Amino acid sequence: MPEIILKNLTKTFGSVKAVDNLDLTIEDRDFVTLLGPSGCGKTTTLRMISGLETPTVGEIIIGGRVVFSSEKQINLSPDKRDVGLLFQNYALWPHMTVYQNISFGLENMKWSKEEIRKRVKEMGDLVKISDLLDRYPSELSGGQQQRVAIARTLAPNPKVLLMDEPLSNLDAKLRMEMRAELKRLHREIESTVVYVTHDQLEAMTLATKVCLLEEGVLQQYAPPLVIYDQPSNIFVGDFIGNPSMNFVDARVNEVDGDKATLEASEITLEMDFRSREGELKSGDEVIIGLRPEDIALNPESGANTCTIYSTLPSGMETVVRAKIRNTMFSIVAFGRVDFDVDSKMEISFPSRNYLLFDKATKKKLGAGSLKFKD
Amino acid sequence: MKKLLNKLLAYFSKPEHMILVVLLIILIYLTIVPLFYIGVDTFTVHSAEVRRIRGSNVGDFTLYHWEYVFNSSASDNLFYKPLINTLLVSVATCAFALIVGGFFAWMVTRTDLRFKKSISTMMLFPYIMPSWTLAMAWLNFFKNKSIGGVPGIFSALTGIETADWFAYGFIPIVLVLGMHYAPFAFILIGGILRNMDANLEEAAVILKTSRLRIIWKITVPIVMPAILSTFLLVFSSAMSAFAVPSFLGGPVRYQVLTTQLYRTINGVNPGAGYIIASFMIVVGVAILTINQIIIGKRKGFTTVTGKSGNISLVNLRKLRTPVSTIMLVILVAVAVIPLMTFAAQSFFVEPGNYSLSNLSTIFWTGEGSPDIANGEPGILKNKYVYQGLFNSFSLSIVVALIAGTVGILVGYSVAKTRGKFGSNMVDRLAFFPYLIPSMAFGAIYLSMFSVQRGFIPPLYGTFAILALVGSVKYLPFASRAGINAILQLGKEIEEAAIILGVKWWKRMLKIIIPIQKPTVISGYLLPFISSMRELALYILLVTPGTSILTTMLFKYNEKGWNQYANAIVLLIIGIVLIFNFLINKVTGASLDKGIGG
């Protein structure tokens, strides 16, 4: 069924490589988010899958059918690829009513009038806009326009659904609501979804798999929680998560089996690896990555005290900036807590998900638990 | 009573209120009151008409003119036929301009055409050049012997005598006006196509819509308001065109409303002329009001526009190079060849003889000999030409100064009091002259200021009336620029200065104008160039003493002194192009961006 395979996909605009040698397999009924900062090539990738953009080199296979191949000179036009595309700005036709917007694609496919009416009604019910069918897009709110756009895209029943930042024009509350509905919708219509976004929260919450791109190059392709806990490099670790991961420069002092002593400026830490990639030897320059919620604050008891620099309580959690000697940490303390600025607290590392990256290659070296070493 | 006085004082203590009220009074006097006088003039016996209206005295009330224009044996030739001609010419011009302009706009924005930049630039040329340049060029090329003149270049080169229907009248008028206004359509439709969200078309592509169906069902309906708006603007412009139908229709007596207006007012029946002028004003105002309504509706028509930069262009494949080349060649032909013919014509002593031995600079630098054009000296040695050049320049400078300055004041007072009744009134009154056909505007000022009005002495024959009519007619350009400049600025910038106690005039000169320099400058320069190339507006009001270049051109042309006319055309085009180029360099504005719609 609709499995999408991208092979060596490359797109250059002039001398700029928008997408660079991308290999990706999107399995049937996956919900894959293409994530990355703006200009990283995610929209270009989506448009290449849809056929609106022609790749420079590579191959695209949708549902076992080659729809593009630079080698075999194949380039099916968008209408022959059986994809649906949802635009960031909805692209509703302003001169047509909601009904006409939804039925337009069905007319192109030569459906009978009766079938069209039935299908439009079905779609209207699905996205809850049945009472708006006679209105023009300009008479609808942003959220309603969004629903119409979804209905229009879904009406011809495409096997593959492509979405280009469909929620970015909505306000925060509505976005939250639509996210939940999109996820539900994905279950109901049972199609493969490729979803472009620059919002990491959206990417994490919606996807079965996240594809993170930077400057046209694939960084990591994995389920959300794997991406979160096992970022393959510093970029991924830094991009995912809010507040972002703490990075501490260090030097490897001593390696002893699964343990390594790490010398940061004025603090010495010991890491106990539970997974490791690549060799580690004393003298290596590394970077330690710590998620803010993996750092705990306890009442002062002597040794590893830090000074509270600022606090941002939001009710559910409090984001704290704290300084231990001359290293600043972001810390998330859950629950309704607050701390006095300039007060002293003890810091500890209760988790097992601390990361070690190679400073030169930025790649992940391993993960494990961490503790202070005196 | 004291309360009222205090209220008034408080009201007028704000400079924008003071300016608003003064402007309101002046604008009513200069745009609304003349309409009343021209109305009266259609019922009045003028000195030229005493003989045709038996037993009447100058100034008597009469229904003769209305009877004569609408319901007499002369009505057909005087009014109805020219009216039909005007309608035919205007509709055909619109169609031509829309098809050519729309086609070029679509090609440039939606296909992988070559030379897009050159084509877009060249496309504006026919509009930047005064409309009569193409008409003169047409005559230079295609005129024939049938009207007693000499053959044009085409006949001289090929030996083929052009037919009257091709050389004069309807066909060339439509082609020339159509080509002149095609850039208009190009700019308006191109602008919409460029700004139109490409996703709208892409959404249709994804939903398996054929190319044709996309154009027909998506593109056309969305650009429809722009097309309609272009249609109306071109229609009203074509209707008020004077020079082109006069040059091209004159030889075969093909009359339109403007040429009839000129004939009657300058001839024995000004009253009839005033009726024609009034009629044109009504039509002009009606058309442009409809346009405003359409534009107003269009606002509710737009959707969020997104990134449309990456629209997929239609691949012209094999046709790409030939089509691009043909389009470029056509534009070069329309833009450059006329200029060459003017230059050429002005150097041939004996018209129609295109041999090298006939070349001479006599019409440029000759001292004048009695056997050529009544001994008129060459234009570079001709004191009348210098007088005209001087008049044109001083007139345009005065017009630019008045219109530009008043435009800023209008902009300031309207923007500051936005939404209030007075503000809307001034805004509309300042725009009103744009709705009135140029020549009819000249006519109403002729009617209003040819006699003493209150403390204002009769102005006919003076430089002042030209300056006045020009300033008011081009005020819309300047006031649009002014309103935009002040609105863009936002009020905080001025409020910051008010808090510091900076005086009003200082705020204007030191803060507002410097920040919005480009817009303000364009508010001065657009009236300048427009006035420089204007004919229809001034033609009824000039006297030999106040001749300007364009009216001299018209007179030379009427007398058949072709070489002089061509030389002057070259002179005017030179000035217009140089100044348009300067403005464009300095401010980014240009004639083609003037008011548009």
Image (tube, coloured by chain):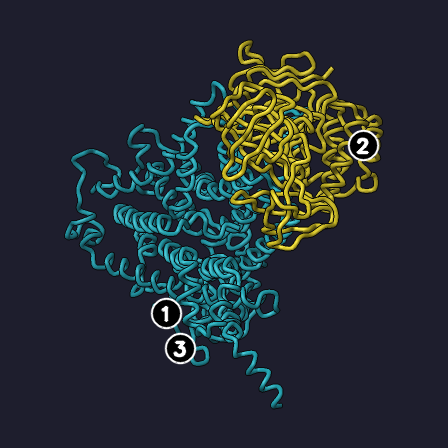
Q: Nearer the viewer, residue A55 or B579?
A: A55
* Amino acid found under the numbered disc labelled 1: Ala
Which callout, 1 or 3, points at the residue further toward the start of the chain?
A: 3
Labels 3 and 2 in the same subunit: no
Residue underneath mark 3: B457
Residue underneath mark 2: A123
* Separation (CA) of disc 2 from disc 1: 70 Å
Nearer to us of marks 1 and 3 is: 1
Residue at (55% x, 16% y) in the render: A8
Q: Where is residue B284 in the image (x, y as percent from the top left)?
A: 55, 56
Q: In this view, does B282 lie to the left or right of B580?
A: right
Q: Colour of chain A?
A: yellow
Nearer to us of marks 2 and 1 is: 2
Q: In this view, does B543 lie to the left or right of B198?
A: left
Where is B376 relative to A195, above or below? below
Label 1 secondary element: helix
* Separation (CA) of disc 3 from disc 2: 76 Å
Q: Where is residue B27 in the image (x, y as percent from the top left)?
A: 50, 69
* Amino acid found under the numbered disc labelled 3: Pro
Which chain did the renderer colour cyan? B
Q: Position of residue B202 (x, y in %)?
A: 62, 30
Within-10-Å neighbours for mark 2: few <14, some 14–19, many 20+: many
Label 2 secondary element: helix
Question: Within the image, what quadrant is residue B264 found in?
Answer: bottom left
Residue underneath mark 1: B464
Label 3 secondary element: loop
Mark number, residue A172:
none
* Amino acid found under the numbered disc labelled 2: Met
